[in-house]
Image (tube, rainbow, N blue to C red):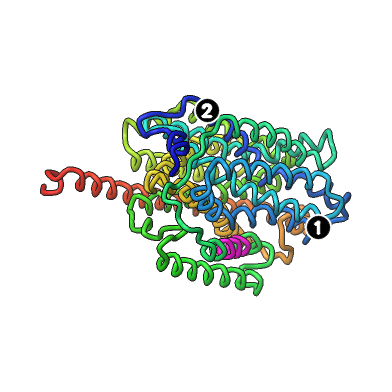
Amino acid sequence: MTAATTAEIPTPSQGHPQRWLILGVICLAQLTVLLDNTVLNVAIPSLTKELDASTADIQWMINAYSLVQSGLLLTAGSSADRYGRKKMLVAGLALFGIGSLVAGLSQSSAQLIAARAGMGVGGALLMTTTLAVVVQIFDDSERMKAIGLWSTVNSLGFALGPLMGGVMLNHFWWGAIFLINIPVALIGLVAVIKLVPESKNPQGDRPDLLGALLSTIGMASVVYAIISGPEHGWTSTQVLGAAAVGVAVLGIFVWWELRIPYPMLDMHFFRNQKFIGAVAGAILVAFGLGGSLFLLTQHLQFVLGYEPLEAGLRTAPLAVTVVALNLTGLGARLLKKTSTPATIAIGMTLLAAGLAAIAVLGGDNYTGMLTGLIVMGAGIAFAMPAMANAIMSAIPPAKAGVGAGVNGTLAEFGNGLGVAVLGAVLNSRFASLVTVSAVSLPAALAAAGSDAERTRIADAFSSGLETSQLVGAVAVFLGGMVAAALLKRAERADSARTDPATASA
């Protein structure tokens, strides 16, 4: 490591003097990336008309971004550790900005799909380096609060994407939803170059090119199977083939990482009970959040009759609660007063209770759903930052990029798994109550022969939603208790190793 690089990295006992300004800059960049996960959904009618896009084209416009981003998260994190987190942050902003410009000016579906894939590369670099930089510039006393604010951006991305897309489309043409990213990317580039210190792994490990290739193919294949399952059927050749390829390639990836001296992802991390507990909890938070929002948007539109923009507005209280609690630092104070396992247990219990409240109280009116959304938001505000902090603290600081890549990969996987599992529960319950040939609720309602039949179909769908939310609540609660127990055991083991008297006792 050079002397200049050493000087740029703050010591554990201090934070960077401009750390809060830097946090604001990277959170703005992070929010832009997250918005593009959902902003395109509201533009589908415009794209279909103006680009003459087919259904398959629309699917690839949406999926190209998430597939490339999720497939590259581990590779992006490893690259940031090796080549420098500031360099990768700059590269991510530049690629994202260029991709947004090409997307906004696209004249065909193929151009837009290619641009979205390029934006996915930039998004992967941004998703991993932002969290890694947070870990580097904040000391132990402030890191939890900083990660809480960083996590807040994730919740805002879910809520604001459809809202921003709807507002933009009401006043401008569809390309504006991408071009608005460009000034943000430019501001971010200037701020990062001037403010963010460079940091990287001082050991300078050799690049694991085969590991990068295997992880990218494996993760992209698994995510593709999860994304395409609801449309093509979970037992279809397309879905099973993609899942089989993904699992096989990831198995080879694990085998390779265990046998080389410079692995991209050190598999020995998975021997750390603290890491395992945090990993399990992170997947389940994303599972509950992603699956429940997927179901909620359907419930609000199909059962309660709201328009897409109105439905988006009515999910906003969840994000508002997360933002309010993290901005006040309540989660960080709870962690200091109790412990990481206790904070996660409280958060996961609240998240499960919110899901259950929506299932029981929100079936026929929005008031009951609002209660559940607020309780869910409180649970996410407590659990998500605590688990992100647990994951990052279980990994050596030199591998902060890899840790952020793991955290991002778990979020992508958990979101997809939540949609897949809770969606399957919904469909199974719906199919057991009514017999319809249509593949969606709107189609089934349109094909109904009478008002009584339409009422019966709507009631069956509501029952399926209730069942799936309750299944999600049980899974989140039990998983949260397991994650908290694993983290508690890891803390006891760490305490025993550092305190010989405790160990002998």
Q: Is residue 222 magenta?
A: yes
Tell me which residue sits at (63%, 45%) in the image: 92
Badge 1 or badge 2: first in the primary sequence: 1
Q: Residues within 10 Å of mark 2 (few under 14, many from 20)?
A: some
Q: Which part of the image, by quadrant, shows the N terminus?
A: top left
Q: Which residue is mark 2?
A: 324
* Residue 161 or residue 177, whichever sits in front: 177
Report which quarter residue 109 is drawn in: bottom right
Residue 260's tag is: none
**Amino acid type at image mark 2:** Ala
Between residues 483 and 493, which one lies in front from this camera angle? Answer: 493
Q: Is residue 68 left or right of residue 276?
A: right
At label 1, the amino acid type is Ala
SS at badge 1:
helix
Q: Is residue 54 visible?
A: yes
- Numbered mark located on residue 110 in the image: 1
Which residues are the magenta region? 216-225
Residue 288 visible in the displayed image: no
The answer to whether residue 498 is magenta is no
